Amino acid sequence: MVRSKEIIKKDVVDQLYWDSRVNAADVEVSVSDGKVTLSGTVPTLQARRAALLDAYSVSGVQTVENDISVRYGEPLPSSEEVEQRVRYVLAWNPDIDSTNIEVRADAGLVRLEGTVDAFWKKLFAADLAMSVGGVLDVVNKLAVVPTNDIIDESIADDIVGALGRNSLVSAEAVDVTVRNGFVSLEGTVPGRLARDAALEVAYYTPGVTGVEDRLIVAE
């Protein structure tokens, strides 16, 4: 059953008001053909991401365009302060070796450069930076350099095997290709949860250097 844009909009708005991480009064929602557009302002990147995930969680939503901007509620810390805060967060997290990560900040924009040894660590490093007060956006330029030389066929086999063990997604519905560690996922999945599950399988597989999401979410 196709849900009307009015119902979808109401559910997205209700979801935003439910989420204590988001001040929904400052977020505007529009819907057209299953596409939700979010606009307005929030005080942190975490709130911006939360709003995105809230919209995607609503039935009938196919895509979300997140035009929400981050407006820091207090005087913005200096670039030097932001850099120090991000370096501190990265250095003290046991899952990240920040030795080869360089942090640069300019007016709230943080740029991460250097290397990590797994793709999920690249994503996680950006998440950690986003949690720092005064960060308005993150440009993630970290390169993934696996410590072991894993061939593409082995990576693909590992991903297909993990998909087969996952209750949220059918391995037969997802086509996996790997070239030089870069993974591409194609196919049609029944919902957002299945899509996210398939992507997480690729993110956490050893040897993966990048992931392209070409999955289609069916109604």
Image (cartoon, grey):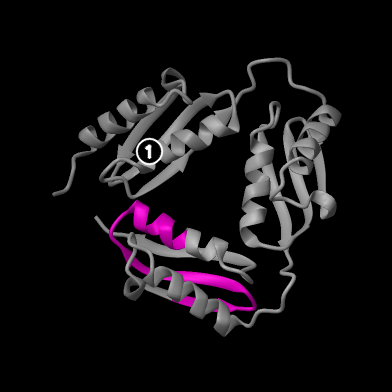
Q: Residues within 10 Å of mark 1 (few under 14, many from 20)?
A: many
Depth check, front residue: 93 or 17:
93
Q: Amino acid at mark 1?
A: Ala
Left or right: residue 180 compared with residue 201: right
Residue 212 belongs to the span the image colors magenta? no
Image vertical order of residue 156 relative to residue 128, above or below: below
Q: Which residues are magenta?
A: 176-199
Name the residue at 55% across, 61% down: 203
Give the quarter of the image for residue 80: top right
- As drawn, which residue projects farthest toward the top? 74
Image vertical order of residue 131 relative to residue 64, above or below: above
- Image coordinates for residue 9, horizontal then vertical, percent: 28, 32
Depth check, front residue: 12 or 50:
50
Image vertical order of residue 158 relative to residue 143, above or below: below
Rendered-image quadrant of the C terminus? bottom left
Name the residue at 25% across, 37% down: 8
Look at the numbered disc 1 and give the secondary structure of its residue: helix
Left or right: residue 8 compared with residue 65: left
For mark 1, what is the residue? 55
Name the residue at 64% across, 67% down: 209
Depth check, front residue: 93 or 151:
93
Name the residue at 48% across, 35% down: 50
- As drawn, which residue projects farthest toward the front? 94
Give the quarter of the image for residue 147: bottom right
- Image coordinates for residue 154, horizontal then vertical, percent: 56, 82
- Image coordinates for residue 67, horizontal then vertical, percent: 50, 36
- Image coordinates for residue 208, horizontal then vertical, percent: 61, 69
Residue 193 belongs to the span the image colors magenta? yes
